[in-house]
Image: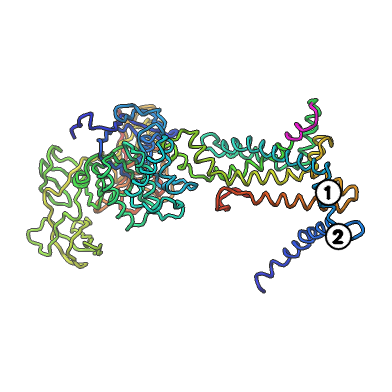
Amino acid sequence: MARPNPDEIIINIEHLSKSFGEKKVLDDINLYIKRGEFITFLGPSGCGKTTMLRMIAGFLEPTEGVITLDGKNMVGVPPYQRPLNTVFQKYALFPHLNVFDNVAFGLKLQKVPKDEIRKRVSKVLKLVSMADYEKRDVSSLSGGQQQRIAIARAIVNRPKVLLLDEPLAALDLKMRKDMQIELKEMHEKLGITFIYVTHDQEAALTLSDTIAVMNEGKIQQIGTPTDIYNEPVNAFVADFIGESNILNGTMIEDRKVKFLGQVFECVDEGFGVNTPVDVVVRPEDIVVKKKLDGAQFTGTIKSCVFKGVHYEMFAMTPDGYEVMLQNYRKFDVGTEVGMTIDPYDIQVMHKDCTENVFKGVMKSSNKVEFIGEVWECEETGFEPGTEVDVHVPFNKVDLEDDEKTTTGAGNVNFLLYKGNHYHLTIITDMGYHVYVDTNDVWDKNDMVGIEILPENMKITKR
Amino acid sequence: MKRSKWALPYFIFLVLFVLLPLIIIAVYAFRATDGTFTMSNISAFFTKPTIVKTFWRSMEIAVENTLICLLIGYPVAFILADKNLNKSAFTAILFILPMWINALMRTIATAEIFHAAGLPLGRGSLLFGMAYDYLPFMIYPIYTVLNKMDKSYSEAARDLGASSFKAFTKVTLPLSLPGIMSGIMMVFMPTVSTFAVAEILTRNKIQLFGSLINEQFNNMMWGQGAALSLIMLVIVGLTTLLPTGEAEETEGGTI
């Protein structure tokens, strides 16, 4: 994306990092936010999105990096001197003040004349449809009403930027949908920049002009909702946003990709020849027909669930891949179906890596230390102290239930179903990443033992 | 057997050790030595200058002590409850620790320290000793309220344009009022009626209302002592009617 004119940028974030003790929560974030934009920081819990919001608000100071607002450096400026306001997750309405005094809180501190306070408060309460509630106790309000007062209390100060920290998380589904529409309308009416933090991808897609998808302290992708949905840059984004089939594939040459045991035409170029890639196909983009002739691949329907508007089905291909389908038509379990995918609906992505490569040091000629543990390996003939790379294929890492009997241990941090196996990201106790392909079912945050057999390591001198 | 029958032993206990003594006190207060009804024991409280003076002196010292405890206790509770300033629960225990030692022993020790340091025993030593005795009772309820308080309230205040100090005076302090009120009650009530502490720490130089009652009983003036006890009971009872600042008392730090 071309960088817009400096006048159009309200917030600029450069090389922003934050650590709590040893733990790095944000890692070298670079981002600009345009004036009047509705931007969402989207990611799972612990991805660093709230930390970023709190640093913009001024409740946390960055470990490294710069945040500028309208060209002025905000680092070190206390929250009360920043021209922005926050809507807190649990609203944080002051229980000892009534609705009017809550909304008027900021204006009173600015010493705004009394009659102007009155005017501005009633105007903003009208905007959030709470005009008749001025004298009410905040504890007597419902969740949705408290939400409106929290928004009113923030926007009455006419901030340049409104920060919203998961503001809809505490509401029920129907209320949440209604508030989403209202927030969108409010954003259009006020014309100020909204920064919204959530783990709810549906809210992000509905509300935002721009989405920044975050994971493990890094921005994975920034773009419009359609960009992010249609062209995810990696498996994490594809998996986090919407439903998707993520499959291992090989880019045979430009515009030709092989996956599900078939060669498909696609529109991607520049990946090289015979390059391993990840392929994403949205379930609604797979055309399903009862007719088998003319289909690119076939399968048998294994399950079928009605989802309100569409049916969600899983089909098993003869090669043993499971594919998720969404269709307005119902296909009964056991039906043989033919499927085709339009070249434009195939999204090809670079793989981050194709095997585990650990940096290690030889302890003796048949013992090697990496990821903080000493492992037995085959006789290498290398001197102790030799620096080596240890290569381990994803499917040659064994996981055990009991982490006490294995050499390594870690937690399942991320898991991805790839049609016929799971691709797991394990983070060890020492913070190292180990990638594993397995057919066993593990859950996120499971504690697992890691074992790698000597014959499965390929050790090369660095 | 009905559930309510289980309460019977407690009911008997209450009657024997709370209700009956109260009735006896009331009876003695309104009975002359010859057994007839009299108001003279009660009216003495309003007319006898020594009693009036002792009463006001007691109130004065109780108010002073409560203020001292509040002025020292609030900042201490605030620091203890702030997770950035106080990283371990150990410091909180340090402040509660003196409560584990018998109050009389602490008081005697305080008097000895004043004596050894060559400081005179009087109002100063009395207030010092009392503050030392009752400070934990002020700290604890305030600490409990501050500790439970959602820190997003003070963040919201700062976000809306309040400096840290303003955020404290406009949000944190009013929201901690229930803790302050129960702290005040827990310090004020026992200080009004104290007598042993005053006797030990001032070598009887300053007489408090509690000591006065004690003196009446020691001199077999049962009627006068009972009347003064009754009056004190009413006054202490009245302090519990003080506004707690917040409707939901359950959220306060009453212990």
Relative vertical location of residue A353 with respect to residue B250 in this rendering, above or below = above
Label 1 amino acid?
A: Ala
For mark 1, does the 10 Å Cα neighbourhood hold few (<14), some (14 to 19), or many (20 or more) residues? some
Q: Is residue B107 magenta?
A: no
The image shows residue A376 at horizontal and vertical percentages of 39, 38
Q: Which residue is mark 2?
A: B37
Q: Which residues are magenta?
A: B119-128
Query: Is residue B222 left or right of B170 when viewed as pictured?
Result: right
Question: The C terminus of chain A appears in which quarter of the rendering?
Answer: top left
Q: Secondary structure at mark 2?
A: loop
Seen from this angle, which residue lies furthest top? B118
Query: Is residue A315 left or right of A429 when viewed as pictured?
Result: left
Q: Nearer the viewer, residue A35 or A403?
A: A35
Res. A172 image quadrant:
bottom left
Res. A308 image quadrant:
bottom left
The image shows residue A214 at horizontal and vertical percentages of 31, 41
Q: Which residue is mark 1?
A: B44
Seen from this angle, which residue lies furthest left? A294
Q: Is residue B126 magenta?
A: yes
Q: Nearer the viewer, residue A312 or A172?
A: A172
Query: What is the chain identity of the residue bearing mark 2?
Result: B
